Amino acid sequence: MRAFPPRRLLAAALCAAGLFVSLPARAETLADALISAYRNSNLLDQNRAVLRAADEDVAGAVSALRPVLQWVAEVQQFDTRQRAGRDASLGLQAQVTLLDFGRNRLGIDIAKELVLATRQALIGVEQDVLLNAVQAYFDVRSAVENVAINENSVRVVGEFLRATQDQFDVGEVTRTDVAQAEARLAAARAGLAAAQGQLAVARETYRAATGHYPAALAAAPRAPALPRSMDEAHGIAQRRHPSLLQAQHMAKAGDLGISAAAAERMPELTGSVSVTHNDGTGDDAVAGLGLSQTIYAGGRLSASHRKAIAQRDQARARLLQASVLISQGVGNAFAGIDIARAQISATDRQIEAATIAYEGVKEEAKLGARTTLDVLNAEQELLDARAARITAEADLQIANYSLLAAMGLLTAERLNLGIPTYDPEAYYNAVKNAPATSVQGRSLDRVLQAIGKN
């Protein structure tokens, strides 16, 4: 193997290092921002925990169908006329509900509907998290571009002020012209300071949405695929939006709640077995059946039934209102898209006309046909047109993703972000049969490790 001199090795290493340093840093894309928001959202973690708690409610409802086994230890100290002493006993008791006319089964069904509703609520939170990331991404891009055009405005007005000062020195313009240019430069610097402040605010919002401050942001991606008509979007939203699906499950739970309240009035048959060891008397074994039914409970059962009916009515009204709000959201998103597109078209024409006007006014000012104020006003109109164009572009992008959210399609899975997503069924499948082990049991331990919560 050929050996290279140390100097040549050092030169090659420095050359390689120079090539590495010269490579441009990869700009952060919208997909990067969405992935970071999905991975770092405390709000998602919070609502995933809420879902796991709802999963445990199903396990709790299932456990009501199973026997309850417990040990009982008793010690009695007595002193009577016949004798004095102490009795001790240790027993094992088991009790199970044999017949409750569907009461516990209804409890399981209600818990399952609430789990499904909570899953849809989690999807709704996911949509909010991702839409906030979209908003933050384009707010930062707009703020950066606004800072750039304001910096350019300060530079242009500063050069104009110097030229005006030179003209004043040779007597071509008055002191008023210089003062106007100085005032406009101060205004341009104030506008730059405001733009820089807006950028600082946008950066903080971005950090809150994604978990980190933005680096260089890439250009806006191609618009997502959207429905061709508002009717198509309405149809998708009425089938897929998580708020509507959540309300549907809550309405089903309300119907089941009425049946459960009615079942509370029915009899209950239980079976019990107990084995007790008594000091001095030996062992006792008892088995029995018990049938009971509440005849009067001070009005509690009637109140529970009326409450269930009211909750059912509340859930149905919420379902109807969810449909109304979803339709409104789709309409608002479509309107936002149309408005942004119209603004972009208008500002393009405005920029074109303002550019021609600005160049013309500058030339006319050189000939004495325009004043300094005319030039400064033309430059400001061009600046305002460019800023409006930036805002309209950001509004269009946000409106596109707002439409996806209004249809219930703004999720990490449907956006094809290419990352592992949270599986809401994994924990449920591990606990739905009410395993007797704790959360450190083998199956649950694997699930918790998979979601990073162990």
Image (cartoon, helix red, strand yellow):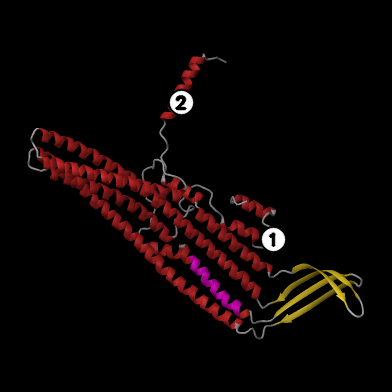
Question: What secondary structure characterizes most of the magenta part?
Answer: helix
- Give amino acid for label 2: Ala
Disc 2 packing (10 Å; few <14; some 14–19; many ≥20): few
Q: Nearer the viewer, residue 238 or 21?
A: 21
Where disc 1 sits, the SS reads: loop
- Is residue 326 visible in the rendered image? The answer is yes
Where disc 2 sits, the SS reads: helix
- Determine which residue is flagged by label 2: 17
Disc 1 packing (10 Å; few <14; some 14–19; many ≥20): some
Position in image of residue 450 (x %, y %) = 60, 50
Q: Residue at x 47, y 20 (%)?
A: 12
Q: Residue at x 51, y 53 (%)?
A: 42
Query: From mark 1 to mark 2, how far is it between C-alphas?
Result: 58 Å
Q: Residue 66 lies in what quarter of the image? A: bottom right
Position in image of residue 298 (x %, y %) = 62, 84
> From the viewer's perspective, is 412 left or right of 443?
left
> From the viewer's perspective, is 133 left or right of 250?
left
Which residues lie in the magenta part? Answer: 245-261
Q: Residue 443 lies in what quarter of the image? A: bottom right
Q: Residue at x 46, y 71 (%)?
A: 318
